[in-house]
């Protein structure tokens, strides 16, 4: 499969995998809070900027997880389906 830089399916591929990376980051952030890793739940609930801190944590994890998802997709563009 050859793709050009202006192919809309390539943009769709990037956006789709970035979405799944953001979703994975949201799940991971929720698990960090649920299992109270490093007493994170207590720190968030007892701070006046706790919601903003959780948003920033999710945002940064979305950047990392989204980039990993996109890199995985790009590396498997030319692979055989079998």
Image (tube, rainbow, N blue to C red):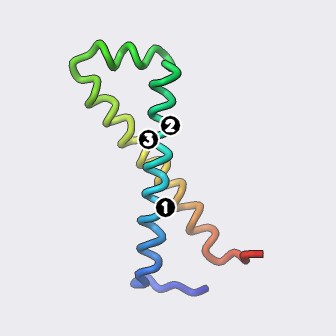
Left or right relative to 73: residue 79: right
Apparent side of residue 15 relative to residue 37 in the rendered image (left or right): left
Q: Position of residue 16 (x, y in %)?
A: 45, 64
Residue denoted by label 2: 28
Residue sitting at x 57%, y 65%: 73
Mark 3 surroundings within 10 Å by alpha-carbon count, few (fewer than 14), some (14 through 19), many (20 or more): many
Quadrant in which residue 6 is drawn: bottom left
Q: Residue furthest left?
A: 48
Residue under label 3: 26
Query: Which of the two discs, 2 and 1, labels the residue nearer the N terminus?
Result: 1
Q: Residue at x 45, y 48 (%)?
A: 23
Labels in figure, total: 3
Residue 11: quarter of image? bottom left
Q: Are marks 2 and 1 in contact (CB under 8 Å)?
A: no
Evaluate if marks 2 and 3 touch, with contact meaning CB atoms under 8 Å apart. Answer: yes
**Image spot of residue 29 (x, y percent):** 45, 34
Above/below status of 17 relative to 25: below
**Picture residue at 39% right of the left edge, 41% below the top:** 60
Label 1 vs 3, first from the N-terminus = 1
> Which residue is disc 1 drawn over?
17
Specify the quadrant that holds the N terminus.
Answer: bottom right
CA gap, disc 1 to disc 3?
A: 14 Å
């Amino acid at each position: 499969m050859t793709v050009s830089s202006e192919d809309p399916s390539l943009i769709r591929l990037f956006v789709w995998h970035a979405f799944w990376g953001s979703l994975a980051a949201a799940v991971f952030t929720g698990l960090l809070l649920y299992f109270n890793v490093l007493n994170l739940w207590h720190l968030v609930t007892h701070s006046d900027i706790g919601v903003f801190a959780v948003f920033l944590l999710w945002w940064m994890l979305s950047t990392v997880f989204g980039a990993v998802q996109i890199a995985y997709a790009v590396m498997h563009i030319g692979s055989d389906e079998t």
